Structure formats: C-alpha cells, structure tokens
C-alpha cells in the first residue's frame, strides 16, 4: 500500500465536503460545473479522480451521463455504494496519467478535481492535463483543481508553528515555495505554475477561481454559522472568488479551460 492509498483509506473526504466549510468548495465547484454545461444538450461528463463520488454521483443522480475514474479502490467502493443501479454512470478504476480506455474527443466536460494534488513533477502534471484534453471534445471544457502554496505557508508553517520542522527537513525553497514528495501527500503550486502548465496544451483559460477563498482561514467560524449567515458568506464568496488578486491566497483553486 502506498502513501496515497493509506491516506484515503483512513481519511473522511466525504465528511470534509459535507462540513459547513467544505460546502463552500463544493457549492462553488457545482456552480461552475453548471456554467460549463449550460446550453449543452445531453452532455457527457468525465470525472478523473472521482474520489467517493461527491460530484460524479450527484451529477449522475441529476440524470447526466457520467464516467467516473478513480485510482483508489477504497474510494471507488464508497462511490459505488451510493448508486442504486438506475443512474447513467460508468465507474472505472484507473489512473489520470493513462486514460487510454477512453476515446479521443468524447466528453463535453472533463474534471480533474483531485489528481493534481498528488502529482509531484511537471511532466506528470502535463501528462494528466494532456490526457484530460485528449478525451474532451473540441470546444469542451476541462476543470482542474489545485492546492495552493501560500495558505500552507501561512497556516501550517507559521500558524501551527512548524517553521523549524520544515526548515530542518529542507521543505521550503529560498522563495518560500513548499517542496513536496509522495510521503507529504499534497503538491502545492502558485498561479504562475498553473499558467505554465496550461501553456503546454491546446486550451484557452476561461476562468481561474478561488474555490474556497478565505474560508479555511476561518473554518471554526464558518462551521458555527447559522443558515442565514452562511448564505451571506456564500454571497460574499461568490462576489470575490474570481478576483485574481486574491486567487493565490485560496487553499483550493479551479482552473477552467476550453479545448481549442
């Protein structure tokens, strides 16, 4: 069992997305999924790295034709347990780096909402992105999620007093970029790195969105909000989540691309 399998076998990803603070990322992503699919008749959707199915199962239960690819068997078992057999969904155990079972130009929307968190070289990231573009129809959309560098420096390195630890283990570059390995589980990027990856494939960027923005900095306050206050928080979040001056401070971002 590798680091990634061990992590997801023991981590409640479903619970995170169902928490009040996790709902911000989920509702934001769903908002932009709807925007990408607006006006498309009978869209075909692919999610690569579908996890426990928070998005794939929801979309399939709405009647969309979904293909869900997931690497971790434990996650795939949870995803399949949510289905009653009537949903138009195909589930596949597979790897974001090799989508060869899937044909070129097949999907109106391809989503990578987790794989880039766990790919540690530029070559791997380009391969995953290239595969996603390959299976997407010309003019179709690709949505790619990333974990961002600065929130980890702010919250983990300084906020949780891990500065000496990360310095001792040489986990920071001279310009304060976190250095990740598979044992660290998550790869962290900056906005300029996302743009550099995009330049390697035949796409144009539609939007780069802060999917949770300031939410995780105030997680305990968000979780304690009543329904009315949380609604106001979401209104505020949606108002600022496309502001490019704030993107790098968000824990998660969503790169929305269109295949040329």
Image (tube, rainbow, N blue to C red):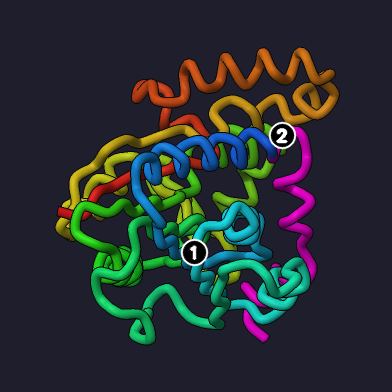
Please name the residue shown 52% across and 58% down the image.
64
Is 117 placed above or below 194 here? below
Residue 41 image position (x, y, % from top left): 37, 51
Residue 232 image position (x, y, % from top left): 67, 13
> Quick check: can you spot residue 123?
no
User: To which quarter of the image does residue 56 belong?
Assistant: bottom right
Please name the residue shown 58% across and 51% down the image.
166
Please name the residue shown 84% across and 18% down the image.
226
Residue 209 image position (x, y, % from top left): 41, 34
Crowding at mark 1 (Cα within 10 Å: few <14, some 14-19, many 20+):
some
Residue matched to label 2: 21
Residue bounds of the magenta highlight: 1-22
Q: Quadrant of the N terminus?
A: bottom right
Is 83 placed above or below 31 here? below
Nearer to me, 63 or 188: 63
**Residue 7 lies within the magenta run:** yes
Q: Is residue 45 left or right of residue 136?
A: right
The label number, if any, that marks residue 65 in the structure image: 1
Is 140 placed above or below 101 here? above
Crowding at mark 2 (Cα within 10 Å: few <14, some 14-19, many 20+):
many
Say which element carries label 1.
Answer: strand
Q: Is residue 217 left or right of residue 129?
A: right
């Amino acid at each position: 069992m590798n680091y990634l399998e061990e992590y997801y076998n023991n981590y409640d990803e479903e619970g995170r997305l169902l928490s009040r603070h996790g709902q911000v990322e989920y509702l934001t992503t769903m908002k932009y999924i709807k925007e990408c699919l607006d006006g498309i008749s009978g869209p075909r959707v692919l999610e690569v790295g579908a996890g426990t199915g928070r998005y794939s199962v929801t979309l399939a239960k709405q009647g969309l034709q979904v293909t869900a690819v997931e690497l971790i068997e434990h996650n795939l078992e949870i995803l399949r347990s949510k289905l009653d057999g009537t949903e138009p969904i195909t589930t596949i155990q597979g790897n974001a780096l090799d989508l060869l079972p899937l044909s070129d130009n097949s999907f109106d929307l391809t989503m990578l909402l987790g794989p880039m968190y766990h790919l540690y070289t530029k070559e791997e990231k380009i391969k995953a992105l290239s595969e996603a573009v390959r299976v997407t129809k010309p003019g179709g959309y690709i949505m790619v999620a990333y974990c961002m560098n600065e929130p980890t420096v702010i919250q983990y390195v300084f906020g949780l007093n891990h500065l000496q630890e990360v310095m001792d283990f040489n986990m920071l570059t001279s310009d304060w970029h976190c250095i990740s390995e598979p044992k660290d589980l998550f790869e962290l990027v900056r906005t300029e790195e996302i743009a550099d990856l995009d330049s390697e494939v035949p796409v144009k960027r539609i939007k780069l969105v802060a999917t949770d923005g300031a939410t995780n900095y105030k997680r305990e306050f968000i979780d304690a909000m009543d329904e009315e206050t949380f609604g106001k928080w979401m209104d505020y979040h949606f108002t600022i989540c496309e502001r490019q001056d704030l993107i790098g401070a968000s824990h998660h971002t969503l790169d929305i691309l269109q295949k040329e």
